[in-house]
């Protein structure tokens, strides 16, 4: 607004009225310009309908045959009654392979009021470094055309770095078209009535990208009748039994809601899901919208449908929903017998002695029990005369527990950067403590953190720090100091836990060994990011 000079002496009444009129007209002009631009954006994508690319290949091109096939799959899927449904996972292979599994997710949608469906898919063919929200008007299948929700898509495209309105991952790329969104649509068309679509293809499946998308969706979906579909298969081209083992590790982490470990293990190729990013983004959005349960509705792989079990692809149908019941997996405690604890302590000792004396990793084949061969995160702490001498561990469950203990024990002796390597002369004086970690769960309320029970992981972007549950007890910290010190461990300011860009995860640990528990240093070092 113009400012009058201080020397202006006339009555301001009429002038101010003129100024108010001028300002009102400026506002109308701004709104008009914004409206024209918005109209132009919509007009620019008029008639930009994404035509079916894999009809006749992944599913029948004939509408009647397609409808019969989908209806047949859904009629065979027996699913429980689930209230508070927010998201589902569904596979995206050819219908003859994955249709019987996908139908379980879509059977949940029957008779539900859904106004909008957000389908999040990976990019199989085109490489790009962002999350692509389709900028066209519609997606088409042999069953008809589904309109894109332009308003929702436009808002989403401006809600974070890496979210863009684009046709990358949706249009033709080197003669090939992405199928992972498209194959979900006939199922939606046969289970829902009128709905709008928000098609999303993730070119970047990093944790940061998943978090950005998940948080943005949660903000936009709040209070609406919207469902998320995460489009993903699981492991690819392993023998049948191996695929089942790999896939059930992923499904276990999903039901435990440990999406941070999932993200690490997907990026490290320890676990497999081509749409791992879409699953994690859906979990983050669902969690922020109140979901506290994940249920695997159906698991199978291509060997179950074709009979060829030499090279199979895994499929799962999963539901994320809000339940009045507490998450039962969270309260399950991991236990070891005294014999198993002693076996691990002896293994840690042998591993350290082999590493220090012979400068090599202990040759080890297998543990005596199946429990010790479960994949678990774990830390080994070394003390000498009651003082910390080394502590390194894996946060994510990347290896069987026994092998994890072997690996991190040797690393604690030789690779903890805070200390010189352990010498042969120190070996008789070392004491060993092992901490076996539970799955990670994001802290929804800092008042839920219990000193003496919980360990913490603080993550903000590339910064991450961990403190084990015994640390605040040894240091006589309260909850606030524990939070602050974990932030410092991550290389962040003490109050970084208050920052919306910071995620706080908690875990418990089964701790054994070292009868003496001195007040040692608070540093506990994670070997792998983690």
Image (cartoon, rainbow, N blue to C red):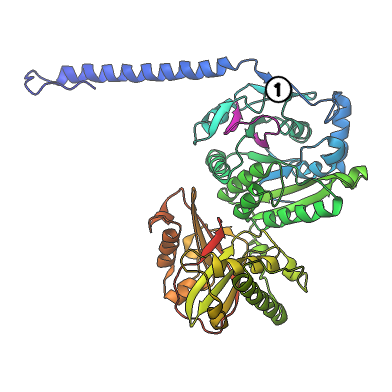
Q: Position of residue 210 (x, y in %)?
A: 58, 43
Which residue appears at 46% of the width and 57% of the height? 490
- Depth check: 69 or 416 in front? 416
Q: Quadrant of residue 441?
A: bottom right
Residue ID at (69%, 76%): 336
Magenta segment: does it hold 56? no
Q: Is residue 329 left or right of residue 485?
A: right
Q: Up-down: is 14 above or below 98? A: above
For image coordinates 85% across by 25% down, the residue present is: 56
In this view, the residue farthest toward the right is: 307
Q: Is residue 85 visible?
A: no
Q: In this figure, which residue is indicated by the disc labeled 1?
A: 174
Image position of 310 (left or right of 5): right
Residue 163 appears in the figure: yes
Residue at (70% x, 44% y) in the render: 88
Q: Is residue 280 left or right of residue 417?
A: right
The 10 Å Cα crowd at callout 1, few under 14, some 14 to 19, many 20 or more, is few
The image quadrant that residue 72 belongs to is: top right
Residue 312 lies, in percent from the top left, at 84, 45
Q: Is residue 66 above or below residue 15?
A: below
Number of labels in the image equals 1
Q: Which residues are magenta?
A: 116-134
């Amino acid at each position: 607004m113009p400012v009058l000079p201080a020397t202006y002496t006339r009555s301001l009444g009429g002038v101010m009225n003129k100024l108010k009129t001028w300002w009102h007209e400026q506002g109308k002009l701004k709104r008009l310009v914004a409206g024209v631009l918005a109209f132009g954006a919509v007009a620019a994508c008029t008639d930009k309908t994404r035509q079916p690319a894999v009809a006749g290949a992944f599913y029948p091109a004939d509408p009647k045959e397609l409808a019969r096939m989908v209806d047949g799959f859904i009629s065979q899927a027996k699913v429980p009654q689930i209230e508070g449904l927010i998201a589902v996972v569904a596979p995206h292979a050819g219908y003859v392979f994955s249709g019987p599994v996908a139908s379980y997710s879509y059977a949940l949608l029957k008779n539900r009021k859904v106004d909008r469906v957000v389908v999040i898919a990976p990019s199989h063919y085109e490489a790009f470094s962002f999350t692509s929200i389709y900028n066209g008007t519609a997606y088409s299948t042999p069953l008809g055309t589904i309109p894109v929700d332009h308003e929702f898509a436009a808002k989403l495209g401006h809600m974070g770095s890496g979210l863009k309105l684009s046709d990358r991952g949706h249009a033709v790329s080197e003669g090939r078209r992405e199928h992972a969104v498209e194959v979900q649509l006939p199922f939606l068309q046969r289970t829902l009535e009128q709905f709008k679509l928000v098609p999303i293809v993730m070119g970047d499946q990093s944790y940061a990208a998943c978090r950005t998308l998940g948080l943005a969706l949660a903000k936009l979906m709040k209070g609406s009748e919207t469902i998320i579909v995460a489009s993903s298969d699981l492991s690819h081209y392993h023998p049948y039994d191996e695929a089942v083992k790999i896939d059930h590790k992923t499904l276990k982490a999903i039901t435990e809601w440990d999406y941070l470990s999932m993200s690490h293990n997907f990026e490290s190729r320890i676990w497999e899901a081509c749409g791992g990013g879409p699953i994690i983004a859906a979990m983050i959005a669902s969690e922020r919208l109140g979901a506290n349960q994940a249920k695997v509705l159906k698991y199978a792989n291509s060997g179950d449908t074709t009979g060829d079990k030499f090279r199979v692809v895994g499929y799962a149908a999963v539901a994320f929903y809000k339940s009045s019941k507490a998450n039962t997996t969270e309260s399950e405690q991991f236990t070891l017998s005294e014999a198993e604890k002693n076996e691990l302590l002896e293994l840690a000792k042998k591993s350290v002695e082999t590493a220090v004396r012979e400068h090599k990793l202990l040759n080890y084949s297998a543990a005596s029990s199946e429990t010790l061969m479960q994949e678990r995160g774990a830390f080994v702490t070394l003390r000498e005369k009651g003082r910390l001498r080394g502590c390194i561990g894996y946060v994510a469950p990347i290896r069987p527990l026994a092998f994890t203990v072997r690996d991190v024990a040797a690393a604690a002796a030789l690779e903890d950067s805070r200390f010189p390597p352990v010498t042969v002369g120190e070996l008789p004086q070392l004491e060993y403590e092992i901490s076996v970690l539970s799955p990670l769960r994001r802290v929804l309320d800092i008042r839920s953190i219990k000193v003496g029970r919980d360990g913490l992981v603080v993550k903000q972007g590339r910064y991450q720090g961990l403190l084990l549950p015994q640390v605040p007890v040894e240091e006589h910290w309260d909850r606030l100091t524990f939070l602050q010190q974990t932030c410092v461990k991550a290389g962040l300011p003490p109050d970084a836990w208050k920052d919306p860009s910071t995620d706080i995860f908690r875990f418990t640990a089964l701790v054994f060994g070292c009868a003496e528990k001195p007040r040692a240093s608070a540093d506990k070092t994670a070997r792998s990011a983690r």
